[in-house]
Amino acid sequence: MADINEYCPHFAPFFGFSGVCAAMVLSSAGAAYGTAKAGMGIAGMGTFRPELIMKSLIPVVMAGIIAVYGLVTSVLISGNLSPTDGYSLLSGFVHMGSGIAVGSTGLAAGYTIGIVGDSCVRGYALQPRLFVTMVLILIFAEVLGLYGLIVSLIMNTKAENSICKR
């Protein structure tokens, strides 16, 4: 029978906190880029058609949701980290993968929403029929981040089974 310290080393929580960091930093960076890029398009469009500004805020809102995905994952991961309970190396690696999954897809989704939002908002100022197309493309971009959240949640439930009890 192996010692519990073999499966639950003292450095294992480092990997769990790395997952928390990856989830928050990468998804927030994606959301920030998406918000900034779409905001530039709104500012450019607003000088010519100020009556369309409120409908053009959709890309900014959708980019902000990406950061919430990272927040949800980081809260779930940090809920499993306890100073009194043991934390297995397997849990650390799974939580790190979970954070990287939601963070990297959040970064990609935010980047996509920013580019699509900027182009489509400017096009919407010239041709109002582009609104539905803009929303559909933004939904497809948002789903990239949602896929990462789903994978992250599945990984997080698998890691809960491997927590060590001291």
Image (cartoon, rainbow, N blue to C red):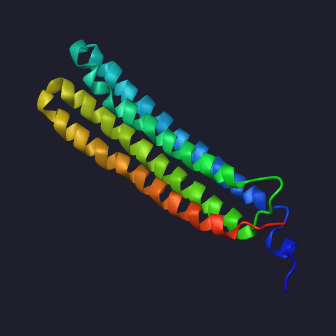
Which residue is at 51% across, 63% downward? 154
Image position, residue 78 (x, y; %): 68, 49
- Quadrant where the image shows the C terminus: bottom right
Question: Can residue 27 be spotted in the picture?
Answer: yes
Residue 112 place in picture, x, y as percent: 38, 44
- The quadrant of the image that shows the N terminus is bottom right
Residue 84 placement, left or right of 51: right
Residue positioned most to the bottom: 1
In the image, is residue 104 above or below residue 132? below
Q: Nearer the viewer, residue 107 or 158?
A: 158
Location of residue 161 in the rendering, given as x and y in whole percent from the top left corner:
65, 69
> Measuring 52% from the left and 58% from the top, which residue is drawn there?
153
Instruction: Residue 48: tell me if it is visible.
Output: no
Give the residue drawn at x 79%, y 67%. 165
Q: Residue at x 23, y 38 (%)?
A: 134
Q: In terms of depth relative to the viewer, which is nearer, 84 or 31?
A: 84
Apparent side of residue 148 relative to residue 89 in the rendered image (left or right): left
Quarter of the rendering containing residue 122: top left
Seen in the picture, residue 27 relative to 98 is either above or below; the reply is above
